[in-house]
Protein backbone atom coordinates (compact mmCIF):
# COMPACT_ATOMS: atom_id res chain seq x y z
CA UNK A 1 0.00 0.00 0.00
CA UNK A 2 1.27 3.47 -0.84
CA UNK A 3 0.73 6.10 1.84
CA UNK A 4 -1.70 8.83 0.71
CA UNK A 5 0.09 11.40 2.87
CA UNK A 6 3.78 10.92 2.04
CA UNK A 7 3.73 8.47 -0.90
CA UNK A 8 6.02 5.85 0.70
CA UNK A 9 5.39 2.17 -0.03
CA UNK A 10 4.21 0.07 2.93
CA UNK A 11 3.17 -3.56 3.27
CA UNK A 12 -0.44 -4.33 2.39
CA UNK A 13 -1.14 -5.43 5.96
CA UNK A 14 0.25 -2.25 7.56
CA UNK A 15 -2.13 -0.32 9.77
CA UNK A 16 -0.14 2.89 9.49
CA UNK A 17 2.69 4.32 7.41
CA UNK A 18 6.15 3.45 8.70
CA UNK A 19 7.42 6.87 7.57
CA UNK A 20 4.80 9.45 8.61
CA UNK A 21 2.55 7.27 10.86
CA UNK A 22 -0.60 8.11 8.87
CA UNK A 23 -3.36 5.69 9.90
CA UNK A 24 -4.72 3.65 6.98
CA UNK A 25 -8.36 2.85 6.56
CA UNK A 26 -8.80 -0.88 6.06
CA UNK A 27 -9.51 -1.78 2.45
CA UNK A 28 -8.70 1.60 0.87
CA UNK A 29 -5.89 2.01 -1.62
CA UNK A 30 -3.97 5.04 -2.85
CA UNK A 31 -5.46 6.74 -5.95
CA UNK A 32 -8.59 4.59 -5.85
CA UNK A 33 -11.30 7.07 -6.93
CA UNK A 34 -14.07 4.99 -5.38
CA UNK A 35 -12.46 5.03 -1.94
CA UNK A 36 -10.19 8.03 -1.71
CA UNK A 37 -8.41 8.55 1.59
CA UNK A 38 -7.16 11.99 2.45
CA UNK A 39 -4.59 13.16 4.97
CA UNK A 40 -6.07 14.54 8.15
CA UNK A 41 -4.71 18.05 7.50
CA UNK A 42 -6.59 18.59 4.22
CA UNK A 43 -9.54 20.93 4.64
CA UNK A 44 -8.45 22.35 7.97
CA UNK A 45 -7.74 26.03 8.07
CA UNK A 46 -5.62 27.96 10.51
CA UNK A 47 -8.58 30.24 11.25
CA UNK A 48 -10.48 27.38 12.84
CA UNK A 49 -7.67 26.65 15.24
CA UNK A 50 -7.40 30.34 16.17
CA UNK A 51 -11.15 30.52 16.78
CA UNK A 52 -11.01 27.40 18.92
CA UNK A 53 -8.11 28.84 20.90
CA UNK A 54 -9.99 32.08 21.52
CA UNK A 55 -13.06 30.12 22.59
CA UNK A 56 -10.98 28.08 25.03
CA UNK A 57 -9.32 31.19 26.49
CA UNK A 58 -12.69 32.89 27.01
CA UNK A 59 -13.96 29.72 28.68
CA UNK A 60 -11.00 29.64 31.06
CA UNK A 61 -11.43 33.32 31.94
CA UNK A 62 -15.14 32.84 32.70
CA UNK A 63 -14.30 29.80 34.82
CA UNK A 64 -11.61 31.71 36.74
CA UNK A 65 -13.97 34.65 37.46
CA UNK A 66 -16.71 32.32 38.70
CA UNK A 67 -14.23 30.39 40.83
CA UNK A 68 -12.88 33.58 42.41
CA UNK A 69 -16.44 34.78 43.08
CA UNK A 70 -17.18 31.48 44.82
CA UNK A 71 -14.03 31.76 46.94
CA UNK A 72 -14.88 35.33 47.87
CA UNK A 73 -18.41 34.39 48.91
CA UNK A 74 -17.08 31.52 51.05
CA UNK A 75 -14.50 33.81 52.66
CA UNK A 76 -17.10 36.49 53.44
CA UNK A 77 -19.54 33.95 54.90
CA UNK A 78 -16.88 32.44 57.18
CA UNK A 79 -15.48 35.72 58.52
CA UNK A 80 -18.68 37.69 58.79
CA UNK A 81 -18.80 39.88 61.91
Image: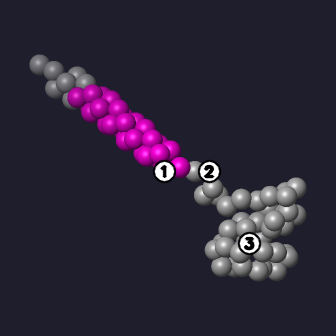
Magenta-span inclusion, residue 54: yes
Image quarter of residue 9 = bottom right
Query: Which range of residues does the magenta coloring cover?
Result: 45-72
**Image spot of residue 46 (x, y percent):** 48, 50
**Image spot of residue 13 (x, y percent):** 85, 75
Above or below 76: residue 48: below
Label 2 sits on a secondary structure element that is loop
Above or below 74: residue 19: below
Q: Residues within 10 Å of mark 3 (few under 14, many from 20)?
A: many
Q: Is residue 78 visible?
A: no
**Between 39 and 69, the one nearer to me in the picture:** 39
Q: Which residue is mark 2?
A: 43
- Answer left or right for 33 relative to 19: right
- Answer left or right for 59 relative to 32: left
- Residue visible at 82% across and 80% down? 11
Q: Which residue is mark 1?
A: 46
- Answer left or right for 67 relative to 11: left
Q: Which residue is mark 3?
A: 3
Whole-angstrom CA distance, mark 2 to mark 1, is 10 Å
- Residue visible at 74% across and 72% down? 3
Above or below 10: residue 36: above
Sequence-wise, which precedes: disc 3 or disc 1?
Answer: 3
Label 3 sits on a secondary structure element that is loop
Residue located farthest toward the top when viewing the structure as drawn: 81
Amino acid sequence: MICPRCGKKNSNSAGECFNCHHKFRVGYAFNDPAHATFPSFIGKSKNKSKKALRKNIVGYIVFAVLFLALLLSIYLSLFQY
